[in-house]
Image: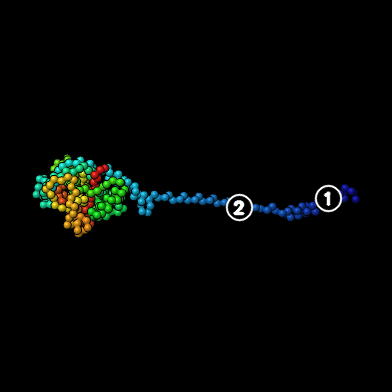
Amino acid sequence: MNPKHIILTLLLMLCPIGMAAQSTITRNKPKPAVTKPKPAAKPKAKPKPAPRRNNTSHSGSTSSTVSLSAELNKLINNMVYVAGGTFTMGATSEQGSDAFDNESPTHSVTLSSYYICKYEVTQALWRAVMGNNPSNFKGDNLPVECVSWDDCQTFINRLNSYTGRNFRLPTEAEWEFAARGGNYSRHYKYSGSNYISDVAWYDGNSSNRTHPVGTKQANELGLYDMSGNVWEWCSDWYGSYSSYSQNDPTGPNSGSDRVLRGGSWCVKRGGSWNNNARNCRSSNRNNNTPGNRNNNLGLRLVLSQL
């Protein structure tokens, strides 16, 4: 046989074997390990911001502090200077036949200077100081009522501890001098006018309730509601007048009425929303037990020094 044919035949015989071997190698070649990608890590949740601390505690201490500060600033700004002077206290001629027996005898009183608030103590101020509101008729700018003389002393003591001042109730003489207009008095029957509806909430116009302070006409000193709205406690014990001239009187040292309540029968001046015009005169007097509370009893503050 031709040698070329032999070589060609051998090559043809070897081709299938090589292809089979290559196929086997290809089939048996281990597949590269497939590494599954790790799932992408979830972004960490951003921590929720801590709730903002409410500056007001459950007791409302901070907001109460803010309210107290605002109310105290208003109180100081509303104190009216009353220059000392001498006046006739009691049933003077302009009071006419409306005067009661306990307004006599008239007598001369000389007072040192002092400051008095142009408004009755409001419910907003009372609540800011005391943390409660005992009033029957509710409203921030209404006068506080349903407060006894004893309650007023507690209120004033706390107020003074906050302010470092010496607020107090007016003496009866201080109250009447201020109601009459002090040294600027025009000798009106009521505080600031001879026409009660101009200056007072009383039974003829009140609709049987108190009204916001300062909504009637002011008197000669710029004081409001010295006639009507609520009766105002004074510091004195209740007693009969003397005809003698007096300097800075503070009332009797004792009295029979005090025995019943362990305190004093304190004078309430100015009339109130459910009293007639006669009771709203500047010289009118009244009295009650120091523990008595009613929805026509309130107060006004004074300072000897601002």
**Residue 204 can be seen, yes or no:** no
Going by the numbered disc 1, the residue's amino acid type is Leu
Q: How many marks?
A: 2
Between discs 2 and 1, the one toward the N terminus: 1
Q: Nearer the viewer, residue 276 or 293?
A: 293
Question: Could you tell me residue 136's position as x and y percent?
Answer: 25, 55
Q: Are marks 2 and 1 in contact (CB under 8 Å)?
A: no
- Mark 2 burial class by Cα count in 10 Å: few <14, some 14-19, many 20+: few
Is residue 33 toward the left or the right of residue 130 in the image?
A: right
In terms of secondary structure, where does tag 2 sit?
loop
Q: Which residue is drawn at the image coordinates 61% and 52% (left, top)?
A: 38
Q: Nearer the viewer, residue 275 or 167?
A: 167
Q: Which residue is drawn at the image coordinates 27% and 53% (left, top)?
A: 154
In terms of secondary structure, where does tag 1 sit?
helix
- Mark 1 burial class by Cα count in 10 Å: few <14, some 14-19, many 20+: few
Question: Could you tell me residue 2's position as x and y percent?
Answer: 90, 49
Is residue 30 toward the left or the right of residue 191 in the image?
A: right
Question: Could you tell me residue 110's position as x and y percent?
Answer: 16, 43
From the image, tell me which residue sits under label 2.
38
Whole-angstrom CA distance, mark 2 to mark 1, is 51 Å
Going by the numbered disc 2, the residue's amino acid type is Lys
Q: Which residue is drawn at the image coordinates 21% and 53% (left, top)?
A: 297
Question: Could you tell me residue 51's position as x and y percent?
Answer: 44, 51
Q: Nearer the viewer, residue 27 or 40?
A: 40
Q: Which residue is drawn at the image coordinates 21% and 50% (left, top)?
A: 235
Which callout, 2 or 1, points to the residue nearer the camera?
2
From the image, tell me which residue sits under label 1.
11
